[in-house]
């Protein structure tokens, strides 16, 4: 009966995405974790069952917030590629489109960042004519950069083969995971998540550098809650009464923005036959560190974008990607994460799950 319900849900989802009904008729729980994400992304390439004209595709993906779904699919392809290396070419195709969308997002965010900075500055002191002219110069340049990035993404989306690749990826997933039991899947996922956590905890990252250090550390940390979210019920976040969190000090985060973040609350859409349960409070610390480091990255990149547009050192020289203050903040965030031992506790809980 449960299998029939799952199949029915997938068939209805396929219909909503404009896919042929038989394309969703999969009763294999393991394969379905991936095919659900493939189908959801395929839906963003379609409009009412008909193909979006190439000139409109870029904006359709931007407006449809495709980046979140690209992250979800990419996270699972990253997770399972060590078991099936032929998933790698599809992961690269997904990543290429996500990178392009990320470049557009960065350009748009830089413009928003500059507007916010200037608004705060002008509220503090009334700018003279020269300062107003400089601000207008920056905003005009950043608007141009945003429009150029949008055009580049349009071209990338139009040339991308991902739309036609997704049905082939779907068929490959069904074939490769046809013989995977739920027990085998959980054992594999446990091992990969433990490896990801250890990589963050034990990896060497130069926090004096923005992209290769702070951002790379954050990127690897961020994949952990994204993977948990994308697994759709294989890893369950459990709520615990006060005093039961394995790290009591983390309970202070219960009312924080990190605790309310989507990655701290992965929805229970498709409960797994063999789920692994973890303490939600441990996710709070991971999400908080990810978000705090993200704000540093956004500030540093935003200031660099302003400096490049202004072509002087009023804010930060273009060659300086991160300030000493930002480095100190980033190191403090990492130290707090490590001292909390949230990563080690997550590894222990995942390791103890019975597969």
Image (cartoon, grey):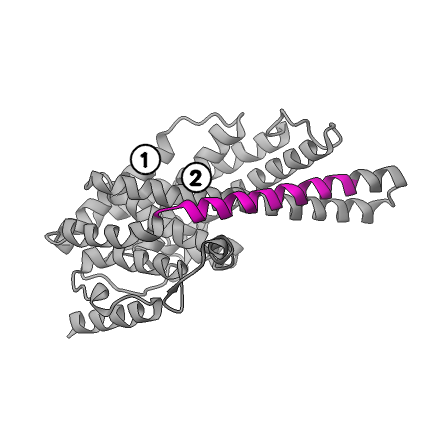
**Element marked by disc 2:** helix
Q: Is residue 156 magenta?
A: yes
> Residue 211 at what x, y percent from top left?
50, 31
> Residue 329 at what x, y percent from top left?
58, 35
Name the residue at the right extreme. Answer: 128
> Residue 172 at what x, y percent from top left?
19, 50
Which residue shows up at 24% across the image and 51% down it?
A: 168
Looking at the rendering, the stretch of residues picked out in magenta corresponds to: 135-161
Q: Is residue 27 above or below residue 317?
A: below
Q: Is residue 267 above or below residue 88?
A: below
Q: Quadrant of the N terminus?
A: bottom left
From the viewer's perspective, is 306 left or right of 333?
Answer: right
Q: Is residue 258 magenta?
A: no
From the viewer's perspective, is 229 left or right of 102?
Answer: left
**Element marked by disc 1:** helix
Query: In the rendered image, which residue does mark 2 sit on?
Result: 219
Task: In this rendered view, identify the residue nearer to me: 203 or 146.
Answer: 146
Query: In the rendered image, which residue does mark 1 sit on?
Result: 198
Residue 339 visible (yes or no): no
Total marks in image:
2
């Amino acid at each position: 009966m449960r299998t029939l319900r799952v199949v029915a849900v997938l068939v209805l989802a396929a219909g909503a995405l404009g896919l042929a009904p038989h394309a969703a008729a999969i009763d294999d729980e393991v394969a379905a974790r991936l095919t659900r994400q493939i189908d959801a992304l395929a839906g963003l390439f379609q409009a009412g069952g008909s193909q979006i004209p190439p000139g409109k595709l870029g904006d359709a993906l931007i407006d449809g917030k495709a980046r979140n779904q690209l992250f979800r699919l990419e996270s699972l392809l990253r997770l399972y590629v060590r078991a099936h290396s032929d998933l790698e070419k599809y992961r690269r195709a997904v990543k290429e489109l996500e990178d392009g969308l990320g470049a557009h997002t960065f350009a748009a965010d830089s413009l928003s960042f500059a507007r916010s900075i200037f608004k705060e500055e002008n509220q503090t002191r009334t700018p003279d004519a020269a300062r107003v002219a400089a601000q207008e110069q920056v905003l005009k340049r950043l608007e141009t950069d945003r429009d150029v990035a949008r055009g580049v993404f349009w071209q990338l989306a139009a040339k991308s083969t991902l739309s036609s690749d997704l049905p082939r990826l779907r068929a490959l997933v069904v074939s490769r995971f046809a013989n995977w039991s739920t027990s085998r899947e959980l054992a594999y996922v446990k091992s990969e998540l433990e490896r990801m956590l250890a990589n963050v905890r034990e990896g060497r990252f130069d926090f004096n550098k923005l992209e290769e250090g702070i951002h790379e550390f954050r990127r690897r940390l961020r994949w952990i809650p994204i993977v948990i979210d994308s697994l759709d019920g294989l890893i369950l976040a459990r709520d615990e009464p006060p005093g039961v969190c394995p790290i009591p000090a983390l309970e202070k985060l219960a009312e924080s923005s990190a605790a309310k973040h989507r990655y701290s609350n992965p929805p229970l859409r498709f409960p797994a036959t063999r789920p692994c349960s973890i303490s939600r409070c441990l996710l709070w610390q991971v999400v908080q560190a990810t978000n705090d480091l993200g704000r540093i990255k956004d500030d540093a990149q935003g200031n660099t974008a302003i400096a490049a547009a202004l072509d002087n050192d009023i804010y930060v020289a273009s060659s300086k990607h991160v300030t000493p203050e930002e480095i100190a903040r980033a190191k403090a965030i990492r130290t707090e994460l490590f001292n909390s031992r949230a990563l080690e506790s997550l590894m222990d809980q995942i390791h103890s799950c019975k597969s």
